[in-house]
Image: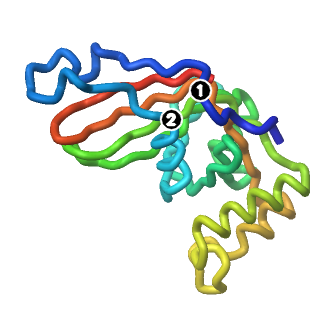
Amino acid sequence: MPDQGPTTPRTTELDARYSSALNPRPGAEDVTATDWERARRQLAAAEIFWVSTVRPDGRLHVTPVIAAWHEGVLYFSTGPGEQKARNLAHDGHCAVTTGGNSLSEGLDLVIEGTAEPVSDPVALEEVIAAYEAKYGAHITSPEGTFHGIGDAFRTGNAVVFAVAPTTAYGFGREDGVYSHTRWTF
């Protein structure tokens, strides 16, 4: 398990080129960088994430996963023989994204980092608890979509990966005002 992830970014920057700071709309001149705390709350609440990995031949692979944000690290899992697991065994660099699909409201997030397999039993129990707290009956109920995932983590039938952000991006939209924030850790 990696060290506890970042609680605060080293730098937070608004990229005016992709924000509404240069837009003549009322209020656009006041656009500011998105606060990391808002991004962190959204990472904790988001239910679906997309993991982007690179195959050994350089082709991209993108797939949805459920994930849990716990102590500054994003955790997701996959079967040991699945494409993303094979890709990450070759090259751990990845991007994990979440957000909405509205042009007018929301915050889309991109986390870049290196996925590290988690095998420590104590760490796995923490991740299982984080998944259960977040997804509830989807994991804890016998009728749940992901029931048994905790046992799969424990037995190695699912590989758990930890991604501590090295860089993150936030693409915000509110009342037609756009912001593009970059956090470095």
Q: Quadrant of residue 146?
A: bottom right
Q: Please report the residue visible at 49 percent of the width from the left and 45 percent of the height from the top.
A: 50
Q: Which residue is mark 2?
A: 36
Residue 98 lies, with reference to residue 79, above or below; the image says above
Indicate the quadrant where residue 124 lies.
bottom right
- Residue for point 58% across, 68% down: 135
Horizontally, residue 8 falls left or right of residue 123, namely: left
Residue 45 screen position, x and y as percent:
50, 56
| Quadrant (top left, top right, bottom left, bottom right) of the N terminus | top right
Q: Position of residue 180 (x, y in %)?
A: 35, 25
Q: Amino acid at mark 2?
A: Trp
Picture layout, residue 123 above or below residue 14: below
Secondary structure at badge 1 equals loop
Residue positioned 63% across, 44% down in the render: 83
Q: Position of residue 90 (x, y in %)?
A: 73, 29
- Residue type at mark 1: give it: Pro
Residue 12, placed above or below residue 171: above
- Asked whether 152 or 81 is in front, the reply is 152
Indicate which disc, 2 or 1, sits on the residue closer to the N terminus: 1
- Circles 2, 1 touching at the beta carbon (< 8 Å): yes
Q: Which residue is mark 1?
A: 9
